[in-house]
Image: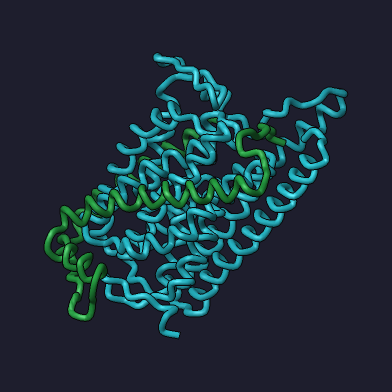
Amino acid sequence: MRKLWIGLLIIVAALSVLPEVAMAAGGKAAPLVVVAHTTKLTGLLAWWANMYNDNMFMFTILSGIFIPLAGAFLGLIGDFLMGLTGIDLTKRELVEH
Amino acid sequence: MEWLYIHMPISGVDVFWPGMVILGLGCGIMGGFYGMGAAWMITPGLNILGFPMAFAIGTDIAHIAGKSIVSTIRHGKFGNVDYPLGLAMLGGTIIGIEIGAQMIMWFERIGKIDLYVRLLYLVFLAFITYMIVADAIKIKQKKKLAAEKGVELDKLEGGVTWYKTMHKLPIPPKFHFKQAGIHVSFWLPFIVGFITGWAAGILGIGGGLIRMPSLIYFVGCPTHVAVGTDLFEVMLSGLYGTFTYTWKGRTEIVGALIMLCGAAFGAQFGAVATKYYKGGAIRLLFGAAVFCCTLSVAEKLIARVYDIVWMDHASTVTILGGVSILMFIIVYQAIKGMIKEVRMKNAGLPK
């Protein structure tokens, strides 16, 4: 156990020193800006890509809402389908070996 | 065959959508079974399908958030999620991830970030593999010893029991975590969360790969509870990741939703599959996945350092081949268990 702690301490110490060495290496690169090409898009995809270009805040909020909603919805369908198999979906036994 | 390709509105690439559904399904099964987001499998997979790397990472994280909701709910119904424990770890995880991410920014200035990150990744993977192998050997020895004494080994007894020492941490407040069945200082899960979060931030991964074994060997969770609780954390960090990557403009939500169609069902199946495995078997299969990952990262590292093209391809074959074999084993055993359970139920026999 003591060896483990010493090992972990060495790794953390080494990683704490490395960035200081790295600071001398050079400046920061400019962030890459991506623009969605909307000319060939129509309907929903065009609306979505336009929102990405024009209103990143709304794009982020809607993305953050769509994903959990889709997950919960698909999860419910999956739950229903799994229930059709007839297996017990409420219990399991905890056995380690 | 044009209908098999879908145009991604933000990144502007045409992607083979059945490939995304299959990738989502496969990684959903692995994620639900092992208790992790499995970003280390999906990001290269998306890249192979044609996503630019920056979009592959963001899209991957967004779909992980969605699928981990599915598997957390499923594991929660089994009683595999210790929510207070997950929340106790969360604070440490967030601070750790932020510090790790800041350190990565410093690393970027060297210009050899890829090499250092991969080396560190190898160290962690090798350590996890060591823990799992040591655990398997020790549990075998304990079983043998118990058989010699004519007693039965407790069914929750583990091989590597470093957590017993950790549980002695005397710093208050102490909490009882019901689902995990442990009574420990609040600071133990917090510190473990911090270290695993820091490692995840440094390595640029979700952290489930490190957190799941840490919950078993350092916190003392039964394997099934470690899987479920880890997924709860993956869900929270995935949601945070979705916001932050989307705000940076690197998420292809259309792609994430397509993947989710496969991943949601895969995650559901993977979570149910744990029911048909003992904790030790889950750990061993996890170890095999980690070993494949270690080998793949080592091959990639050698390929980069010595500029060997075929080694780079071998790295992809190793990870995808290994993961496919493991997935086949998980699915096969789970279906066998499900059929057996239904047959016994229909025959009116006790399980």
Q: How is the image coloured?
A: by chain
Q: Would you say B224 lies left or right of B112 here?
A: right
Residue at x 66% of width, y 49% of height? A85
Q: Is residue A67 left or right of residue A1?
A: left
Q: Which residue: 46% across, 60% down?
A: B261
| Relative vertical location of residue A65 with respect to residue B165 in this rendering, above or below | below
* Quadrant including the C terminus of chain B: top right
Residue B106: tell me if it is visible.
no
| Relative to A35, B4 lies left or right | right
Q: Position of residue B19 (x, y in %)?
A: 48, 71
How many marks the image carries: the answer is 0
Q: Quadrant of the N terminus of chain B?
A: bottom left
Task: Decide which of B83, A64 is in the foreground and name it.
Answer: A64
Compare residues B101 and A63 and report the one nearer the observer. A63
Residue B16 seen in the current view = yes
Q: Residue at x 43, y 72 (%)?
A: B17
Residue at 74% from the left image edge and 50% from the top image edge: B339
Q: Give the colour in which the image draws chain A.
A: green
Task: Residue B43: give x, y in percent of width and height.
Answer: 42, 63
Location of residue B214 in the rendering, given as x and y in whole percent from the top left corner: 51, 37
- In the displayed orientation, state which residue is furthest to the left: A54
The answer to which quarter of the image holds residue B266 is: bottom right
Compare residues B300 and B116 and report the one nearer the observer: B300
Question: Farthest residue in the bottom direction?
Answer: B1
Q: Colour of chain B?
A: cyan
